[in-house]
Image (spheres, rainbow, N blue to C red):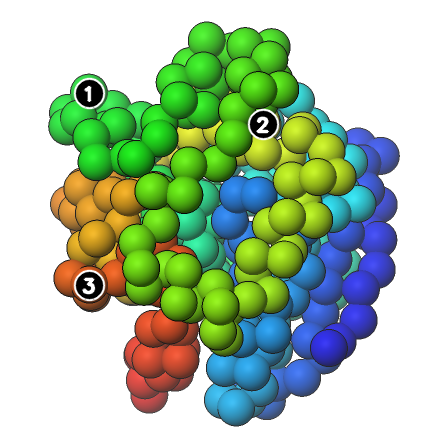
Amino acid sequence: MGTSHDLTLADGRVLRVHDSGRGEERTVVWFHGTPQTGALLAPVLAAANARGIRVISYGRPGYGGSTTAPGRTIGSAAGDVRELAEALDLEQFAVVGASGGGSHALACAALLPERVTEAVVFAPVAPYTEEFDWFAGMADPTSLRAAQEGREKRLAHGLTHEFDPESFVAADWASLEGDWSTLGADAGAAGSASPDGEVDDDVAYVSPWGCDPAEVHMPVLLVQGGADRVIPAAHARHLSGLLPDSALWLRDSDGHISVLEALPAALDWLLDDDA
């Protein structure tokens, strides 16, 4: 299952880092969704190990042992990943992210062009905009709407908010009962440990990123479920229009979790892009 360690950053914060420790073909930095601890999940490790890919992940601030950083932006991830890369002697790597982790992966691609070679993102959150109805199609947008009113409002909202099971389609529940069961368990652990990571993620999603996706000039693969009721397909379509060199795989029957079943094929795309 790899190793885990704490990395102390220049500003004194701690980042909990996870490393599969294997991989002759490529190195990938994995960006987790909301909420997650950042620990390496079994299906991610299985798909990566089968392809000779080393996977490194970390808990964003407020998750899984990483120090909370109120006021962080999506783009703030680039500074943390730069320090992580320097500590692990990573000259170049691809970034892969799920859900809001995909947004953070894209920010690193924009801000670390000397290190990031490609990006693969599953069901990413697009930058907040009024160019399209950003909330349309979300089964329960209340947490993100509360985040628009600030961190304290989002914290208060979380005290009474409960997950809406209608956010997931049947394919999502099937994935959570199958190969991606560890994702559900990890999300539960992250959510019960502290609200800080999830709250600060949500505030970041509805705030300026601190970078421009149009500045991502390496190849990007967007993988999106057409039936997604958490982050609807309009977000991936909007990002596809912003990214100069992107491909969009739209999987009509998939929701927010089941789209991750495409991870092996997406990693194959990543390796094929190197050829």
3D distance between C-alphas at marks 3 and 2: 31 Å
Q: Secondary structure at mark 1?
A: loop
Q: Give the residue at mark 1.
A: 130
3D distance between C-alphas at marks 1 and 2: 22 Å
Q: Is residue 67 visible?
A: yes
Q: Give the residue at mark 3.
A: 253
Given the image, on which type of amino acid does mark 2 rest? Answer: Asp
Question: Percent position (x, y) of residue 32?
Answer: 55, 53
Q: Depth check: give the residue in front, 189 or 97.
A: 189
Q: Secondary structure at mark 3?
A: loop
Question: Percent position (x, y) of residue 153?
Answer: 54, 10
Q: Residue at x 70, y 49 (%)?
A: 189
Given the image, on which type of amino acid does mark 1 rest? Answer: Glu
243 vs 18: above or below: above
Quarter of the image containing the C terminus? bottom left
Question: How many other residues sit within 10 Å of disc 1, few (<14), some (14-19) or many (≥20)?
Answer: few
Location of residue 172 (image quadrant): bottom left
Q: Depth check: give the residue in front, 164 or 28.
A: 164
| Residue mark closest to the camera, 3 vs 2 | 3
Q: Residue at x 63, y 57 (%)?
A: 185
Left/right placement of residue 86 relative to residue 184 reads right
Q: Give the residue at mark 2.
A: 200
3D distance between C-alphas at marks 1 and 3: 27 Å
